[in-house]
Image: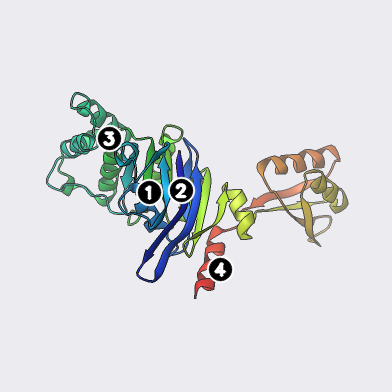
Amino acid sequence: MIVAQDLIKKFATRVAVGGVSFHVPAGCICGFLGPNGAGKSTSMRMLAGALAPDSGRILIDGANVWTQPSLARAQVGWLPERAPVQLDASVEEFIQWSASMKGVDAHCVRQFAAHALSQCGLLNVRTRLCGELSRGFRQRVGLAAALASRPKVLLLDEPTAGLDPAQVLSFRELLQSLKGSVTVLLSTHVLAEVEATCDRLIVLDRGRVIATGTPHEVRLKLGVAAKLEMEVNDPARAQVAIQEAGLIAHSQRLLDEPWHAITATGNVTLAARNIVSQCLARDGVAVRRMDVQTGALEEAFRQLALEVL
């Protein structure tokens, strides 16, 4: 659905984006991550058609953003970091105007706008002026405006910046409701947000893609993979169970008789954990605790930031 090929963008002598390529499948919610200065916002502006790349190409549902701009941009809804709402217009008026500006047929504008208002939970405030709304509601209005033309692709650049925790949770639930109906590329610094909402991740560092894949695959590539930690009464049989699940037993220590702590690494998925549990039950091994400890992406980004300094 979204294809970026060898995107390059320079500002004077600084390379902001240096040969970025990636693909986002249809219906996917994809996180676009990286430290400050990684090139995320520059890439998002190029994808939206607001900034021309020096070289490379962008395809939106097969249409080239720069050689077929009308066709490509008609498929895109874009929400910048600060929602560009019309403060002296009512919410409903602004959404209808947004739909018409995106080329929605005049006979369908009201219908499309009403659907976007409903999607974003704005029906109760549709007659209020945009300028009277809180930051959280303005972000919802911005998202409704992006959705008003029923685009196939939604580009969200730091959409929860400045929102309080309740507003962030509400926005996250709204994103989940869109899953499968629209392809979403979400640029954010809030790593808990992408882990809660995204199917895939793209990680940038210094203008280049350094990792792509599921959150688990990206953790592996960045060296912050999950671990399986357990406390059992028979470490020898537990190690056999770990091997049967395709994992590696890394450490073992005695806690209090008869309990031993064991840590396993590898492709620690829910399926692997279930295999370990089944094998332990089969072999009569007692388990006091078994937890999957998720590797922190924050630590990987901290290391990337240190490398830049």
Label 1 element class: helix
Q: Residue at x 48, y 60 (%)?
A: 34
**Label disc, if present, on residue 47 of the rendered structure:** 1
Say what amino acid the circle numbered 1 marks. Answer: Leu
Number of numbered discs? 4
The answer to whether residue 195 is seen in the rendering is no
Image coordinates of residue 24 in percent, x first then y, are 49, 43
Q: Quick check: 221 above or below 280?
A: below
C-alpha distance separating marks 3 and 2? 25 Å
C-alpha distance separating marks 4 and 2? 27 Å
- Outermost residue to the left: 88
Left or right: residue 278 compared with residue 306 = right
**Label disc, if present, on residue 4 of the rendered structure:** 2
Say what amino acid the circle numbered 2 marks. Answer: Ala
Question: Around disc 2, counting alpha carbons within 10 Å, would you say few (fewer than 14), some (14 to 19), or many (20 or more)?
Answer: some
**Label disc, if present, on residue 148 of the rendered structure:** 3
Image coordinates of residue 249 in percent, x first then y, are 79, 55
Q: Can you identify the residue that label 4 sits on?
A: 303
